[in-house]
Amino acid sequence: MPILEVEHIQKYFDRTEVLKDISFSLEKGQVLSIIGSSGSGKTTLLRCLNFLERPDKGIIRVKGETLFDAGDPATQQEAEIRKKRLHFGLVFQSFHLFPQYTALGNVMLAKELLAKGQPGYDARKKQAHKEIEEQAKELLQQMGLSDRMENYPHQLSGGQCQRVAIARALALQPDILCFDEPTSALDPELTGEVLKVMRELAEQNTTMVIVTHEMAFARDVASQVIFMDDGHILEQGDPRQVFENPKEERTRQFLSRFTQG
Amino acid sequence: MEQIIEQFPVVLKALNIGFLQTLKLFFVTLIGAFPLGLVIAFGSMSRFKPLSVATKLIVWVIRGTPLMIQLLIIYYFPGLVLHHPIWGGGETGRFLAASVSFILNYACYFSEIYRGGIQGVPVGQKEAGLVLGMTKTQIFYHVTLLQMIKRIVPPMSNEIITLVKDTSLARIIALQEVIWAGQAFMKGSQGISGAIWPLFFTAVYYLIFNGILTVLLGRLEKKLDYFK
């Protein structure tokens, strides 16, 4: 059974249809890369998965459970949506780290707030805090930021910020980790260090959905590629097939800039 | 000069009493206007149209007319027009009316500062909180609040210092604040008359108090400097 199933998602902003009948599925441990020009709906699709936007039509299923069904209001209750969001993690293009917390604080905050809501928290407060801190430190270490844990976001480079943001998303152990153009705000040098940790995550079989303009990365790391154009999925399949032998003329046109460059 | 030295202790005592009234009005205004301003800010940002329009109308009227007129209307209107005096006489009644006017006026100014602070925090902060499974309340307290405060402190400092000086307007309804106390010695009070220096000397009170406030608010601003 696929870990993620998206069926016939449709989304309007006012009267403009930005997502047109989007369907795909993803197996556990796979990496899905979504490519396409700006304005093709890639980001909106990710935002729908994370319930930052509400699709007007369609179904989202995770591990067989229907998280969202546009035709069923029972799946759209605010309190429920908050829990459903935890199936997904999202790394933003411009990081959105919390400026008043250190790198470590950023990674720990959500998990601590979540722990506070659990029954019996007060009794094992210290223990819980310690565990969360240990886990956060481990994650930051994994991101190569052992010596940056006590720094505030404004003291970090863009690449470091993005790696903190990745650690922050991982802290909640989401089933599917989404990236929204994670390197678009970075210069080429810093892009490399972020792609490196993402590559490592892929090697550890983290299920990921990655919206990106880094074509080489998408080709090498993805197990599946979707090419989006004007709100449609125009082409979908094995990265080798999409990149080397695109069926659609539009895909070829889009990729030509990359293959020539 | 000799005369001044002779008058000084008497005047100082009277001015101190007056300044106490000034301080009282200052702190009561802050205590009332801080929370009321937040309520008005939320009102003006409400998605419920009638509420936001009504709130914005009130803010427009209050910010668009002199505080002095507001003081006069709030103090005299109930008694003189409605024949139903609600403030009672004497210094207590005047202080009450002045407090209500000041709180209302300053709450409107504060509300605009709050609104700027709230809307100035990038949407991304809230979205980051949401995707991390936080509730809206958690996001407010743990993510946006401190960032708002940081944005609010500088313009708020300005308003607070203006408030110190604005308290002198309460003199229009004969509230016996420090300038009123200084002016009394011109007309004659406690055996001193025709003395103009006490009136001028009241400026020193404002200057010193505002000096202290400036230092304290500056420290607060610096304290929030650890993040950008």
Image (cartoon, coloured by chain):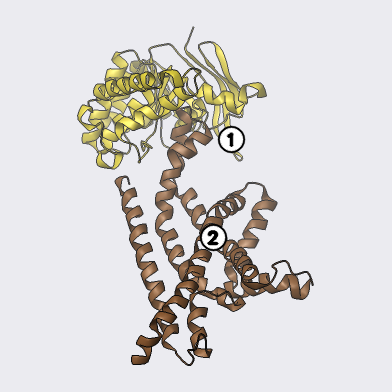
Chain colours: A yellow, B brown
Compare residues A22 and A58 and report the one nearer the observer: A58
Q: What kind of element bears circle 1?
A: strand
Compare residues B35 and A71 and report the one nearer the observer: B35
Compare residues B122 and B11 and report the one nearer the observer: B11
Image mark 1: chain: A
Whole-percent x, y for residue B137 in the image: 52, 36
| Residue A50 to residue B11: above or below | above
Q: Which mark is residue A12?
A: 1
> Which residue was labeled with disc 2?
B28
Q: Are marks 2 and 1 in contact (CB under 8 Å)?
A: no
Whole-percent x, y for residue A172 in the image: 41, 21
Quarter of image, res A158: top left
- The quadrant of the rendering that contains the N terminus of chain B is bottom left
Q: Tell me the kind of residue under disc 2.
A: Val
The span from disc 2 to disc 1 (Cα, nearest Å) is 51 Å
Specify few, some or many for label 2: CA neighbours under 10 Å numbering under 14, 14-19, or 20 or more.
some
Quarter of image, res A113: top left
Identify the residue at image location x=36%, y=70%: B208
Identify the residue at image location x=36%, y=38%: A94
Q: Tell me the kind of residue under disc 1.
A: Tyr
Residue farthest to the top?
A: A1
Whole-percent x, y for residue B38 in the image: 55, 51
| Residue B81 to residue B142: above or below | below
